[in-house]
């Protein structure tokens, strides 16, 4: 059984339509964050599926996406407090 881990997704999307579609896709996963930087809780399989879905909505020549796992050992505080 896979366990859920905290991850950060950041994106820079030029086209308003693509940005809307990416935000709509991320709406169900969002725990917190800001407009183009979000925190989510996913398993490895969910992360793979989510990234595949996001990449299908984006233009690889114009848009950028960053996905990073949060290290639970060094993450000593909630990200929502960092961004205030």
Image (cartoon, helix red, strand yellow):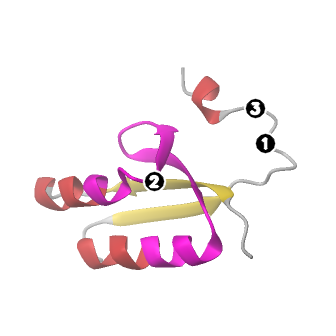
Residue that mark 2 sits on: 29
Residue that mark 1 sits on: 75
Asked if the residue under mark 1 is in contact with the one under mark 2, i.e. CB atoms within 8 Å, the reply is no
Which-is-in-front pick, marks 2 and 1?
2
Residue drawn 25% across the image and 69% down it: 62
- The stretch of residues the image draws in magenta is 23-50
Q: Residue 38: percent from the left, percent from the top?
A: 47, 46
Q: In which quarter of the image is residue 51?
A: bottom left
Q: In this view, does 82 lie above or below 28?
A: above
Look at the image and tell me whether residue 35 can be seen.
yes
Q: In this view, does 27 lie above or below 34?
A: below
Look at the image and tell me whether residue 61 can be seen.
no
- Cα–Cα span, label 1 and label 3: 6 Å
Residue 3 circle label: none
Q: Residue furthest right?
A: 73
Residue 8 is left or right of residue 26, and the answer is right
Q: Residue furthest front?
A: 1
Mark nearer the N terminus (3 vs 2): 2
Residue 35 is left or right of residue 10, and the answer is left
Residue drawn 15% across the image and 58% down it: 15
Q: What element carries label 3?
A: loop
Residue drawn 52% across the image and 78% down it: 48
Q: Residue 83: percent from the left, percent from the top?
A: 55, 27
Q: Quadrant of residue 68?
A: bottom right
Asked if the residue under mark 3 is in contact with the one under mark 1, i.e. CB atoms within 8 Å, the reply is yes
Mark nearer the N terminus (2 vs 1): 2
Question: Is residue 11 shown in magenta?
Answer: no
Residue 47 is left or right of residue 14, and the answer is right
- Nearer to me, 51 or 27: 27
Asked if the residue under mark 2 is in contact with the one under mark 3, i.e. CB atoms within 8 Å, the reply is no
Residue that mark 3 sits on: 77
């Amino acid at each position: 059984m896979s366990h859920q881990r905290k991850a950060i997704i950041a994106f820079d999307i030029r086209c308003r339509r693509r940005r809307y579609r990416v935000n709509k896709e991320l709406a169900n996963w969002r725990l917190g964050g800001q407009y183009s930087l979000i925190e989510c809780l996913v398993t490895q399989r969910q992360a793979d599926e989510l990234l595949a879905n996001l990449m299908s909505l984006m233009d690889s020549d114009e848009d950028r996406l960053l996905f990073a796992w949060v290290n639970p050992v060094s993450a000593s505080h909630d990200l929502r407090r960092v961004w205030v």
